[in-house]
Image (cartoon, rainbow, N blue to C red):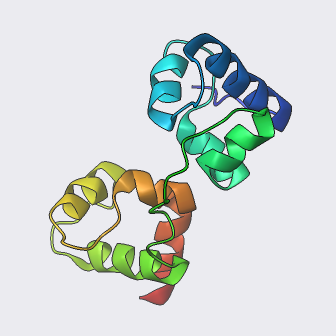
């Protein structure tokens, strides 16, 4: 399967198109529903590319709700440490889906979606393995 490559301008144009159709302020959840079935990037890709949902919307000239982000609740080091803990668990498969299920059972672990705002799954696993 070919993975689409999006320019920054294309990403911003898609956010602007979603906002024109859905209205502002634009939430990541409403954009996510809008982009499904279209040739548009996921909110996770936008966040990785621009640093945050707010920054992606700012690049597109779109308003967002002003809420506190949870992505900085954990430092990069905290995230890598938590993924290393997951990988060390008996029965851990190392898949993103398995991590997400594991994280839901932990009192203070970032969700899979939050983790992906910071790193790709391959990158965080590489960093966690380097620690072991």
Horizontally, residue 73 falls left or right of residue 46, namely: left
- Please count the marks in the image: 0
For the N terminus, the quadrant is: top right
Horizontally, residue 7 falls left or right of residue 37, namely: right
Q: Position of residue 90 (x, y in %)?
A: 15, 74
Horizontally, residue 111 falls left or right of residue 8, namely: left
**Identity of the residue drawn at 52% across and 59% down:** 122
**Identity of the residue drawn at 62% across and 30% down:** 41
In front here: 27 or 2? 27
Q: Position of residue 68 (x, y in %)?
A: 49, 60
Horizontally, residue 117 falls left or right of residue 4, namely: left
Residue 43: name its quadrant: top right
In front here: 42 or 63? 63
The answer to whether any part of residue 119 appears in the image is: no
**Identity of the residue drawn at 25% across and 63% down:** 103
Residue that protrudes farthest toward the bottom in the picture = 132
For the C terminus, the quadrant is: bottom left
Residue 71 vertical position relative to residue 18 in the rendered view, above or below: below
Residue 101: name its quadrant: bottom left
Q: Position of residue 59 (x, y in %)?
A: 79, 40
The answer to whether any part of residue 46 appears in the image is: yes
Q: Position of residue 92 (x, y in %)?
A: 22, 65
Residue 86 vertical position relative to residue 69 in the rendered view, above or below: below
Residue 108 vertical position relative to residue 99 in the rendered view, above or below: below
């Amino acid at each position: 399967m070919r993975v689409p490559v999006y320019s920054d301008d294309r990403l911003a144009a898609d956010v602007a198109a979603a906002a024109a159709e859905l209205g502002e302020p634009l939430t990541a959840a409403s954009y996510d529903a809008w982009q499904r079935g279209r040739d548009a990037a996921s909110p996770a890709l936008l966040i990785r590319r621009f640093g945050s949902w707010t920054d992606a919307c700012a690049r597109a000239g779109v308003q967002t709700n002003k809420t506190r982000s949870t992505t900085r609740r954990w430092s990069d080091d905290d995230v890598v440490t938590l993924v290393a803990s997951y990988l060390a668990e008996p029965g851990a498969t190392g898949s993103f889906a398995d991590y997400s299920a594991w994280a839901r059972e932990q009192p203070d672990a970032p969700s899979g979606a939050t983790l992906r705002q910071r790193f790709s799954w391959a990158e965080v696993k590489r960093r966690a393995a380097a620690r072991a």
